[in-house]
Structures are given as C-alpha cells and as structure tokens.
Amino acid sequence: MGEFEQYIKVVEEQIRCKRAVPCIEEEMKSHLEDQREALMRDGMEEKMACKEAVRQMGDPVEVGIMLDRIHRPKMEKSLLAIVMILSIAGVLLQFLSKGPLKSYILFMGIGMMIMIGMYFIDYSILASHPFLFWFGIGAGGVLFLLLRGGGMVNGSFGYQTQQILLLFAPAYGGILYYFRGKKYKGLFLSLLFLLVPFFMAIYTVNLSGFFILFPVFLCMLGVSVWKGWFGVKKILGMGIVCSPLVVGVFATVFAYASRGANSFQKERIEAFWNPEKYAQGAGYLTYHLRNMSSGFKWFGEGIGYNELVELSSMHSNYIVFFLVYHFGMAAGVLLVSFLLYLIGKMLNLSMRQKNRLGTLVGLGCTGVFFMETISYILMNFGGFPMSRIYMPFLSSGRGQVIHYLFMGIMLSVYGNTNVLTEKTMGFLHATSSNHSGK
C-alpha cells in the first residue's frame, strides 16, 4: 500500500457516514497528488514529495475527525421549528372552528412520526430505483381504488387518490436524474413518463391534483434543461418543455367545447365564471365568498353572511377564510406569510444542494407546497374553482400526512447536503447500475 493510500485509509476510519467516504477519498487523493506534483516541480524526488505532501496534510486522525464533523447528516432545526409552529396553529384553528380536533391531532402525530422516519431514510434511493418508485406509486393508486370499492363522490373517486398523485412530485426527481445527459432522447422520455399521473388523474377524476402537479413537473423539467443537465440547446429545450402546456390548453378548450366534460364538471366551471347565475346552486359558495371578502377588516370580525361561516367544511376547505373573517386580514397575512417563508426556505435549500437529485427532489416537494398554498388561498376567496385542496399543516383531514412526509424528505435532503455531493451520487449511481447488471 502506497504512502497516500495508507494516509487516506486512516482518515476514512474516522468517518462514521460511509456514504461520504467516496467523495472524501476522491478529494483527498486529488489534493495529495496536486501537492506532490508541486513539490516535484520544485526539484524534490517523487518518494520524498509523497512523504512531504502527507506531512503537510496533517495528522490523519485529526483530519478524519474534522471531516467527520463536516460530512455527516445534519438536522435543519429551523424547518422543524416552523413546522411545529404551523402545526400548533392548526390545532388552535381546528379548536376555534369546531373541527375534528381529535382526528386532526391523531393524523398530525402520525405525520410527525413519518416526517422523522423519512429524515433517517437516504433519499438517494430515488436515483437507484426511479422506475420502481414511479410505477409503484401508480400501482398503489390503482390498488387503493380496487380495495376501496364504491363509486364516485361529488364527481370523484375520492380525495385520497389526490394525495397519492402528489407522491409523483419527488419521484419525478429520480426520473429526471436518471435521464440526465441523455440529450433529446432523455428529455422526450421524461415528458412521456408524465402520462402515468395524467391518466391516473383522468381515471379518478381528480384533475385538481394534476393541475397542482403539472406546473411542478414542468418547473422541475425546465430547471433541468436550463442548467444544461440534459445536454440540449436551452431555447429549443425550453420550447419542448412548454409544449405540453400549449397542448393541454387546446385539449381542455376542445373537451369543453365538444362536450367532452360531463355536465357536473361543466356546471362547476360555468358557476365559477358566472357565480351570480348559479347563486342558488353550484355557484353558491363562490358568489358569497367573493361578496363577503369586501366586508373583511384588518382587525376583528368581518361583516358578511353568517350562514356561510358556519359551513361544516369550514375547518378543512376554508380555514383561511375562517381565520380572516373572525380575526381580521392581519391574522391571515401573518399566518400565510409564515407558510410562504417556509416555502421560501425550502426553495433556497433545494437550489443550494451539491447534487442534482437533491435539487430536483427538493423542487418537487417545494412546488407542491407552493401550488397547494396559492390554490387554497384563491379558492377561499372565490378566485379558484371549488376543489378538495389542503392548506399545508392548517386544514383538517388525513391528507395532511403527505405534507409531513414531504417535510421529512426535505429534512433528509438538507441533512445530506455535505454527504451526497455530485461525486458521491455518481459513485452510488454507478454502483447501483453495476449491481442491476449482474
């Protein structure tokens, strides 16, 4: 064993997180070789240059201990603190709105356990087995429908299928990572994979879930193209990324004009654009939500239609409206700003990752939070069609568990920032490919 290999071996023995070893080994070997070459250019013999390079590096045990402190999983305590504050706010809102408090606390507890569990799971498995996760989510959705039984409720097969759909967001990060560097072939195949959640959404009549996911998918794909991860021309690549958006708009207009949508869906759409016409039917909520918004105050209870405030779904579908109506716009702005701050931190964390998978998975989770938050707020004040959308951590329902799961993934992404670098990911990906080929 050479001088460098002995030194690096002692350093590696101090590293507790073995996933970080390949990256550390590569960096140390490169540094030692550069130092050796510099000493040899100054006239030193190769053997002496190797010994001097090692000496200058320092005691291997001390170096290893220092690197161990740097290259090991960390907990993002500020994210955890924000989630705890929002969860407590959710408990208070459920209590004040007379919602299912025990049920909310139960699912909050389950969600937190899942969140902590996800932190200890290595999210890089999404790169090792991207297709398994992608088609596994699709199969899970189909299995859920088969086991659940029953027919449609309010034009849909159930709200839980929407939460299953959302799982495609972080999983898409693994798909994009797999197709990186495969140029236009990889780009088109990445678009082709979107047919799985699309047909699942069509079959379950959960289009609101796909409308949340669709912009997130395109954002993740657009970032990949713009950063050159596919190896295609940026302008042409971005045009290809935007093409499904154009096709989707035309398809939606055609379906509506040709009566492709059923009468229930068409009535809901028409009621959104013209709520006054359907004020006693499908446009009831939109009509009164818009009218009552004009009676809000910055502080204190608003002026408006009291019957609307007593809706049984207030604690789940209209919790932001409830907050603003009873406590004023200042309370609503404060709480929503806090949630948007969390989303901003998630976005910043994602873009600062040292590997592409971490960035893509983080963007998937962040995008879902952002789209749900914006859609929910708009819906609460009549600016978005009535849909089953969750306000992260605040509205009631078992679907909140998915938000804690996503936060667990984000904690895992942050915790491995100094562990799963691009070099480490390359090593793990190569290892996985070799194993799958055996």
Image (cartoon, rainbow, N blue to C red):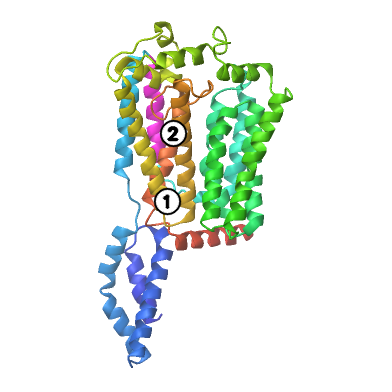
Give the image quarter of residue 159.
top right
Q: Where is residue 158? Give x, y as percent.
A: 58, 22
**Which amino acid lies under the numbered mark 2 shown in the image of this protein?**
His
Residue 313 visible in the displayed image = no
Q: Looking at this view, is 257 or 338 the one in front?
A: 257
Residue at position x 31%, y 13% from top? 301
**Helix, strand or loop for the magenta stretch, by majority:** helix
Which-is-in-front pick, marks 1 and 2? Answer: 1
Give the image quarter of residue 9.
bottom left
Give the labeled residue for mark 1. 351
Relative to 167, residue 288 above or below: above
Q: Are marks 1 and 2 in contact (CB under 8 Å)?
A: no
Relative to 431, residue 41 above or below: below
Mark 1: few/some/many CA within 10 Å (<14, 14-19, 20+): some
Residue at position x 64%, y 40% from top? 246
Of pointers 1 and 2, the one earlier in the residue sequence? 1
Q: Where is residue 265? Give x, y as percent.
A: 63, 20
- Magenta highlight on residue 326: no
Q: Where is residue 188? Give x, y as percent.
A: 66, 51
Label 2 residue SS: helix
**Horizontally, is 315 left or right of 85 in the view?**
right
Residue at position x 29%, y 43% from top? 77
Q: Looking at this view, is 23 or 237 the one in front?
A: 237
Residue 31 visible in the displayed image = yes
Residue range (magenta): 99-118
Can you say which quadrant of the picture contains the C terminus? bottom right
Label 1 residue SS: helix
Mark 2: few/some/many CA within 10 Å (<14, 14-19, 20+): many
Give the image quarter of residue 215.
top right
**Which amino acid lies under the numbered mark 1 shown in the image of this protein?**
Met
Give the labeled residue for mark 2. 403
